[in-house]
């Protein structure tokens, strides 16, 4: 049971929490300083059960969306809306701000795959769930929807652009869906799991291709885009990309670089000259083997960041309420929190056509 440690803390009784693709990087040992005894989980919603003496924006009994970013709201970067880069919340790093349940490189805070969670800066992050919103929709507003939406936003999509997404996990599927909101004329998603590709076709209304069936993915994309390349490319894969033996060995097996950069290579090489590469796939904080010369010679723009959930929530809540986005449509599995180990195994091994798993703590039934 967590305790109030600061006057601006709140304690949340967790009502819904999820397993994220980023959690698999921890589960598989790709993120450094992940310590024994840590509680994972950065996607959760819950009910406020206790507040510190300086908390004024939420009260006991409020049901809240808790952004995965832990942000102070007052530092140089928070004031710019860069809540994923808070300069105060993470004493372990100067790049990323703190993240719930994501190793000590992201601040060492316990996460929400639990019955209760301590929420720092409770005047900043927690956002009251609108009356009538399904908790399954709300929990996906903590990360999946904002990250997919910001991936499309950072891609700088212009009317009728061809947008290419690498990775048909929940984030890639959501990014493909959101690309249409920015005016895309064509959306393509690439993965190696047929069940995920079929899900993406139905949910995101996009073209979907298996990279194991196309030889060189870069040549394939050039061929179907008049040999120019896609206008915008989104890397929604990150550190555990498959598809290149050397990258897999050095990045996933030997950990000589901060994950396999296969998807990022493909993104850089398959985008058109002058195009934009948007990166939301998670890589570790050390070096990667990346073709920076191609970035220079093609005149590319690369935009990357953790999603600033708090900045995006008002717009995304409106989209959910208006039926523009259907977050809970991504959920394929619901498990009791006690079966979380089975949930991780299923998601990691891509069993039972798993796209997104929601965990229900025993506290959710109180």
Image: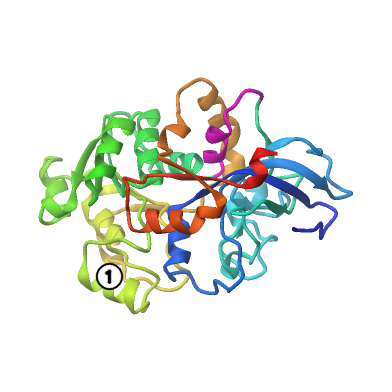
Residue 134: tell me if it is visible: yes
User: Where residue 255 sits: x, y (%)?
Assistant: 37, 77
Q: Secondary structure at mark 1?
A: helix
The residue that label 1 is drawn on is: 248
Mark 1 burial class by Cα count in 10 Å: few <14, some 14-19, many 20+ = many
User: Residue reaching furthest right?
Assistant: 53
Q: Is residue 118 left or right of residue 99?
A: right
269 relative to 81, above or below? below
Tell me which colouring the rendered structure shows: rainbow
Residue 197: x %, y % from top left: 25, 42
* Camera-side residue of 93 and 195: 195
In the picture, residue 141 is in which quadrant?
top right
What residue lies at 59% left-to-right and 64% top-to-bottom? 106
Asked if one can make out residue 231 in the rendered structure from this viewpoint, the answer is no
Locate the C terminus and report the quarter of the image it occupies: top right
- Residue in the foreground of this view, choosing between 4 and 275: 4
Q: Position of residue 362 (x, y in %)?
A: 64, 46
- Establish if 67 lies above or below 178: below
């Amino acid at each position: 049971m967590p305790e109030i440690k600061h006057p601006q803390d709140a304690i949340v009784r967790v009502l819904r929490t999820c397993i994220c693709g980023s959690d698999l990087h921890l589960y598989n040992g790709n993120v450094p300083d992940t310590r024994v005894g840590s509680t994972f989980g950065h996607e959760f919603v819950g009910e406020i059960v206790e507040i510190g003496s300086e908390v004024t924006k939420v009260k006991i009994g409020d049901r809240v969306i808790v952004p995965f970013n832990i942000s102070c709201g007052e530092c140089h970067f928070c004031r710019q809306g860069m809540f994923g880069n808070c300069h105060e919340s993470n004493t372990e790093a100067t790049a990323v701000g703190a993240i719930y349940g994501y190793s000590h490189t992201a601040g060492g805070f316990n996460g929400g795959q639990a019955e209760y969670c301590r929420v720092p800066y409770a005047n900043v992050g927690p956002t009251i769930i609108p009356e009538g919103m399904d908790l399954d929709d709300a929990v996906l507003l903590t990360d999946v929807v904002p990250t997919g939406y910001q991936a499309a936003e950072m891609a700088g999509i212009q009317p009728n652009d061809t947008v290419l997404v690498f990775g048909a996990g929940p984030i890639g599927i959501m990014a493909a869906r959101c690309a249409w909101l920015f005016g895309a004329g064509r959306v393509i998603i690439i993965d190696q799991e047929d069940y995920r590709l079929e899900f993406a076709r139905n949910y995101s209304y996009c073209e979907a291709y298996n990279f194991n069936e196309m030889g060189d993915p870069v040549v394939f994309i050039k061929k179907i885009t008049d040999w120019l390349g896609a206008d915008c490319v989104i890397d929604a894969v990150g550190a555990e990309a498959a598809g290149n033996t050397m990258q897999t060995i050095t990045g996933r097996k030997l950990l000589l670089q901060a994950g396999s950069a296969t998807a990022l290579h493909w993104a850089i090489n398959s985008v058109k000259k002058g195009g934009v590469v948007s990166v939301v796939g998670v890589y570790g904080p050390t070096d990667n083997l990346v073709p920076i010369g191609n970035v220079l010679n093609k005149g590319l723009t690369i935009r990357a960041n953790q999603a600033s959930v708090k900045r995006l929530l008002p717009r995304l809540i409106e989209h959910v309420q208006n039926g523009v986005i259907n977050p809970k449509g991504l959920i394929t599995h619901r498990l009791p929190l006690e079966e979380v180990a089975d949930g991780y195994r299923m998601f990691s091994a891509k069993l039972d056509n798993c796209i997104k798993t929601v965990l229900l703590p025993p506290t959710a039934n109180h």
